Each structure stands twice: as C-alpha cells, then as structure tokens.
C-alpha cells in the first residue's frame, strides 16, 4: 500500500505578538514581543506530518510577494514535496495576525489572500498525485467551493480523506459521508451540531452523533483534556500528556499531521491518536506554529 500523504490547504505568514494580556476592542497594549513565522493550517499540518516521519506532498497557493520563496524553501528543508505549491500573481500570500497572552491563550485574525486562489483546476492538475496517496489531509482555510470539489474528487479516486473542520464551516451531509475521519475541537463540534459542547459529556455525545454521519470515525479534541474518538465499533478517550503549555496555536494542526503519519504507517487508530497527542504535547511547550512541530525522535521521547 502507498505510504504517501497529500495535504491540501493554506499557507500563511504568521505575525505573532506576545502580550501580557489580550486587548479588549479599542484598547492598545504596549510592551509586546514580535516574531514572524510561517503558518497556515494546511502548511502546519504538512510540516507536522513530515517532521513526524511522513512522506508528504503539499498542495497550496502562495502570492507573488517576497514571502513565497522563503516559504517554499522552508517546506523543502522539512523534506516536503513542493512540486504542487502554486503561486498567483497580483495577490498577497495568506497572512495571520496572532496575539498570545501570558497564559498561552490566543486571538487570531486571518486574510486568506492567495489561499482562496487555489481552484478546482489546480486539483484536476494534481489528480495523479492525489490518486497515489494513501491519505489526504484537509482543513478549511481554502475556498469552500474548492474544499467541496476536493472531497468529491478524493472520494471518486478512493483516497481516504481526513478533514480537520478548522476554522468551522458548514458541510453538506453528503460530503460528511465521504470523510474517512472528521477531526473537530469542542467549538467546531458545537458549530457543526448547532448545540453547545462545553462539557466532556456533551463532547462525547457530539462525537457519537457526528460518527453516524461520516464514513469511518470522528475525533473530538479537548485541548489539555485529550480527545474522544468514536468509530462504528469503538469509542474511547485518550488523555493528553501533562506538559506546561506556553503556546497552543498549532496544537490541533500538529495533532492532525502526526495522526496522518501514524495511520499511513499502519498504526491502529488508538495508537495513532496516542502518537498524535504526544506530538501536540511537545508542540504546545514551544512558541509558534510550524516552528513548534516536533521531530519523530522528540515525539517518541514524549511517548
Ligand atoms: P485545536 O488546536 O484544534 O483547538 P485542541 O486544543 O483540542 O485543538 O488540541 C489538540 C490536541 O493537542 C489535544 O487533543 C491534545 O492531545 C493536545 N493538546 C492541546 N493542548 C494541550 C495541552 N495544554 N497540554 C497537552 N496536550 C495538549
């Protein structure tokens, strides 16, 4: 069986400000510390999968600014195949403004830019690569019409799709049914089900309801509490590793990337989730998105 992973999604420049506390509307807070890093949920997940040991091809669209080459070089340093990273003239690379307070809580705004220029025609152009993949990993920072097109295409090609519904968006039932795995956090689960998911009991109930709608299974991630998974014949909680979190920005992204690597290697789902939890536990102890993604050795040490 193929060991290849295709990740399709966003690439962003992350402009990060560490502040004592998050401002309220209209307020200015000074004394921050500034960093610039590469992010975007798609790119973060591609790096998470590659650093954890996956053979990753990343499909994304960048702008024609000075960031694009730097981003591509950084993907190459992580061993990611960039032959399907497209660039679009006259538009900015996706940009995220991120504020992080002392407790590690964050507040983020995003300009999708070139990410919304990834179109169905690009997906048609990469059909051969997609067909060779064992798993396709998706998130929701690309245009909704392109996302739907990809889900349909992967289903037709028989490629297993893992969708991290982040940021949350509505999805047709017929598209949910084409997902091998759906990964949501508590707020994304609440959005999808239009009902609150604030307690572990509500998260478990949400996972059971959502599992009825997808092809194989649902994982509801619960931050420092871990995650709850439901498939047709199993339901289980996996606790998070106990660490001192300093920045949870890409916890879910690293989780999704590492999980895909583990599944491609043939790990059973529960073992793959333990591997992913260890990866994200390392990531939350560091600042940044892609910067925080751990290597295989670091994940194994955490396990
Ligand atoms: P998202 O970033 O999408 O909101 P979560 O916050 O639920 O996702 O985190 C995803 C996974 O990352 C969790 O299931 C858990 O395994 C791990 N994780 C998140 N926060 C922490 C933390 N503070 N300590 C340890 N592990 C964490």
Image (cartoon, grey):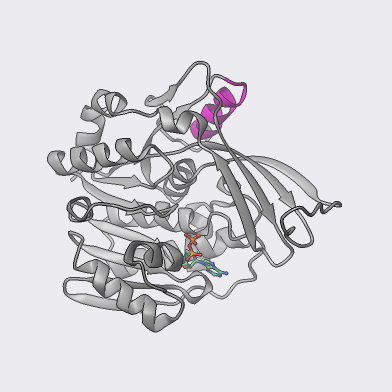
Q: Note whether 176 is above or below 40 in the view shown.
A: below
Q: Does residue 185 appear left or right of residue 33 in this picture? A: left
Q: Residue drawn 54% across and 28% down?
A: 73
Q: Residue drawn 26% across and 74% down?
A: 208
**Magenta span main SS:** helix
Residue 143 location in percent, x, y? 38, 37
What is the residue that sits farthest to the bottom in this orientation? Answer: 201
What is the residue that sits farthest to the front in this orientation? Answer: 26
Residue 273 location in percent, x, y? 37, 66
Q: Residue drawn 19% across and 35% down?
A: 131
Q: Residue drawn 14% across and 38% down?
A: 157
Q: Is residue 66 magenta?
A: yes
Q: Front-most of 78 and 206?
A: 206
Q: Quadrant of residue 212?
A: bottom left
Q: Quadrant of residue 126?
A: top left
The magenta segment: 65-76
Q: Does residue 270 appear left or right of residue 222 in this picture? A: left
What is the residue that sits farthest to the right in this orientation? Answer: 31
Residue 183 location in percent, x, y? 35, 60
Q: Is residue 261 magenta?
A: no
Q: Is residue 300 something that shows in the picture?
A: no
Q: Front-most of 240 and 89?
A: 89
Q: Front-most of 133 and 139?
A: 139
Q: Is residue 145 something that shows in the picture?
A: yes
- The count of marks equals 0
Residue 283 location in percent, x, y? 56, 58
Q: Does residue 47 appear left or right of residue 133 in this picture? A: right
Q: Front-most of 91 and 297?
A: 91
């Amino acid at each position: 069986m193929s060991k290849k992973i295709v990740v399709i999604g966003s690439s962003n420049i992350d402009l990060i400000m560490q502040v004592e506390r998050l401002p309220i509307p209209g307020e200015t807070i000074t004394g921050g510390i500034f960093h610039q890093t590469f992010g975007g949920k798609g790119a973060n997940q591609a790096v998470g999968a590659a650093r954890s040991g996956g053979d990753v091809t990343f499909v994304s669209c960048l702008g024609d600014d000075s960031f694009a080459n730097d981003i591509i070089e950084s993907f190459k340093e992580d061993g990611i195949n960039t032959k399907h990273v497209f660039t679009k003239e006259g538009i900015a690379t996706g940009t995220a403004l991120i504020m992080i307070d002392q407790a590690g809580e964050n507040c983020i705004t995003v300009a999708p830019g070139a990410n919304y220029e990834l179109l169905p025609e690009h997906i048609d152009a990469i059909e051969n690569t997609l067909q060779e993949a064992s798993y396709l990993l998706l998130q929701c920072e690309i245009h909704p019409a392109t996302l739907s097109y990809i889900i349909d295409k992967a289903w037709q090609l028989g490629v297993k799709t893992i969708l991290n519904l982040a940021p949350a968006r509505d999805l047709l039932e017929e598209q949910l049914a084409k997902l091998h795995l759906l990964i949501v956090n508590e707020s994304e689960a609440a959005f999808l089900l239009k009902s609150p998911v604030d307690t572990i009991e509500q998260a478990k109930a949400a996972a059971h309801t959502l599992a009825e709608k997808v092809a194989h299974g649902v994982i509801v991630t619960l931050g420092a509490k871990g995650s709850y998974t439901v498939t047709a014949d199993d339901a289980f909680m996996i606790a998070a590793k106990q660490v001192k979190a300093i920045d949870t920005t890409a916890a879910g992204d690293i989780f999704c990337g590492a999980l895909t690597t583990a599944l491609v290697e043939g790990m059973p789902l529960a073992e793959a989730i333990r591997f992913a939890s260890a990866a994200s536990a390392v990531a939350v102890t560091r600042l940044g998105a892609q910067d925080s993604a751990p290597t295989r050795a670091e994940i194994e040490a955490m396990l």
